[in-house]
Amino acid sequence: MKPDQLQACMSMDGLPNEALVQVAAYFQVLSEPTRLQILNLLRVQERSVGELAQLCGFSSANISRHLAMLAQHGLVARETRGNSAYFSIADPAVYALCDLVCGNIARQFDRAAGQRAAFGAPAARAGKVG
């Protein structure tokens, strides 16, 4: 990405198609629940592939593929120590994005619960009247 395009990425307004493709790819990486689980585990501390595989309940090969995708998009960093590879967060800003989305989903659930309660309230009152 060119410097002028990078500056444009501060907001989506006026992004060229090339940049939109990169933004979409970034979101696509975050669209996989296992990768989100990995990011959540790395939020606490760095971990080895084996640790992540055990905590996620998947094979090391499966976790390695997800980690490769996360590393390719600059979200995690890899460090080799002896025979083990350890992963940590390379871009902590991803957590601000995830927290924003999670907060939005929580508000949607709260609104939906409020709407269900509102629809259930008249029926409950009608039963008490009779």
Image (cartoon, rainbow, N blue to C red):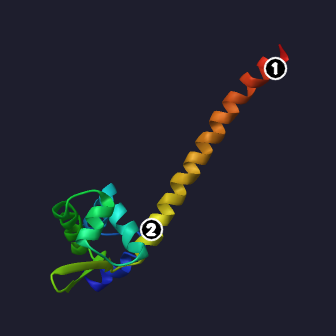
Give the number of the disc on residue 97: 2
Residue 88 in sight in this render: yes
Camera sees residue 19: no
In the rendered image of this protein, does residue 96 appear above or below residue 129?
below
User: Which residue appears at 36% of the width and 68% of the height?
Assistant: 39
Query: Which quarter of the figure is the N terminus placed in?
Result: bottom left
Residue 76 lies, with reference to residue 65, above or below; the image says below
Quarter of the view holding residue 47? bottom left
CA gap, disc 2 and disc 1: 46 Å
Q: Which quadrant of the structure image shows residue 79?
A: bottom left
* Label 1: which secondary element: helix
Q: Is residue 29 left or right of residue 42?
A: left
Mark 1: amino acid: Lys
Percent x, y for residue 35? 31, 62
Callout 1 environment at 10 Å: few (<14), some (14 to 19), or many (20+)?
few
Circle 2 crowding by C-alpha within 10 Å: few under 14, some 14–19, many from 20: few
Image position of 74 with respect to 112: above or below? below
Viewer-proximal residue among 31 and 42: 42
Question: What is the three-letter code of the residue carrying label 2?
Answer: Leu
Secondary structure under the numbered disc 2 in the rendered image: helix
In this view, the residue in front, 61 or 32, is 61
Image x and y of residue 44, in percent: 43, 74
Q: Which mark is residue 128?
A: 1
Q: Mark 2 vs mark 1: give the one in front.
A: 1
